[in-house]
Image (cartoon, coloured by chain):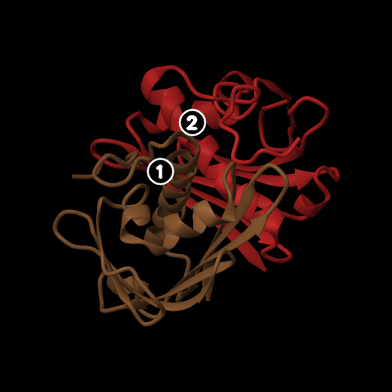
Chain colours: A red, B brown
Amino acid sequence: MAEINHRVGIAGTVEDVYHALTTNEGLSTWWTTDTAGAGDAGSIIKFRFGSGGPDFEVAELQPDKLVRWKHAGNVPETWMDTEISFLLVPEEKQTIVRFRHSNWKEATDFMAHCSTKWAVFLLSLKDAIETGTGRPFPNDIHIDHDA
Amino acid sequence: MAEINHRVGIAGTVEDVYHALTTNEGLSTWWTTDTAGAGDAGSIIKFRFGSGGPDFEVAELQPDKLVRWKHAGNVPETWMDTEISFLLVPEEKQTIVRFRHSNWKEATDFMAHCSTKWAVFLLSLKDAIETGTGRPFPNDIHIDHDA
């Protein structure tokens, strides 16, 4: 099994970060502006990037501490059975976000692409909280010149 | 064992990218301005970030295709025995850079930090080639508020 790991420190409270990870309004500030369905555990969040996008079931919520999603549906296929978690750790000057996208069958080129792209979106989350302006899709930073 | 994987597409030739990965001049445009020792296989490259930094031995060079480094010395300690590789794949509009930092003992918080930071530096490499201006240390994007 392969895993994507990231870690960013955000100058904001755990409450700010938790809000950005658990509400449509918050998620829309940094991942994609087309986000619907966020809510309590069991909710299915639909993230759309133009023509399509992934669904995630909210698997676990520990307020201001942990957000865990299980991939739902089959888009993209290689994300089936994967999980994403955001662990929040308060420090004096910042909230640490420890990100994991786990349970990949193997470290494919697409996984490597997603690893880089998750870093881009976590920096977007950081900017959204620190400056009020993230770079969610469709205003995200492109990491290749396909299409 | 744990591994960091990234993938970026750079609007430049494989020759441009290979030069940026194998010469002091090129490496200084995107990772750290304080780079010395780059050369043929067997060379020890010294990357410095203010007070210190890692050394890497050039383990393998396949011109315009592959660059592979083995960590040398003991800075940082958790990088000992790790390897880094850059595989270059030419496409019509870009050169794909497939990056691996492999052989980590485990997926620690520091590894997660490095994973995010490598994405930042690979985007710096992309900008250096595409725009002429990367963000090498000490002008790199900070991903936390420590120190």
Q: Residue at x 42, y 41 (%)?
A: B128
Is B58 placed above or below B34 here?
below
- Residue drawn 57% across the image and 43% down it: A118
Q: Which residue is mark 2?
A: A125
Amino acid type, mark 1:
Val
Q: Is residue B47 toward the left or the right of residue A5 in the image?
A: left
Q: Is residue A67 visible?
A: no
- Report in which chain the residue with disc 2 lies: A
The quarter of the displayed image where residue B143 is located: top left
Q: Is residue A64 above or below residue B54?
A: above
> A138 or A86: which is nearer to us?
A138
Image coords of residue A60 (percent x, y) = 62, 44
Give coordinates of residue B15: x percent, y percent.
54, 56
Earlier residue among tags 2 and 1: 1
Q: Residue at x 26, y 77 (%)?
A: B74
Query: In the picture, residue B58 is in which quadrant?
Result: bottom left
Kindly identify which residue carries mark 1.
Answer: A8
The residue drawn where x is 46% and y is 55% is: B115
Q: Decide: is A19 above or below A119.
A: above
Quadrant of the image occupied by residue B77: bottom left
Q: Chain of mark 1?
A: A
**Residue B30: image location, x then y, percent:** 37, 48
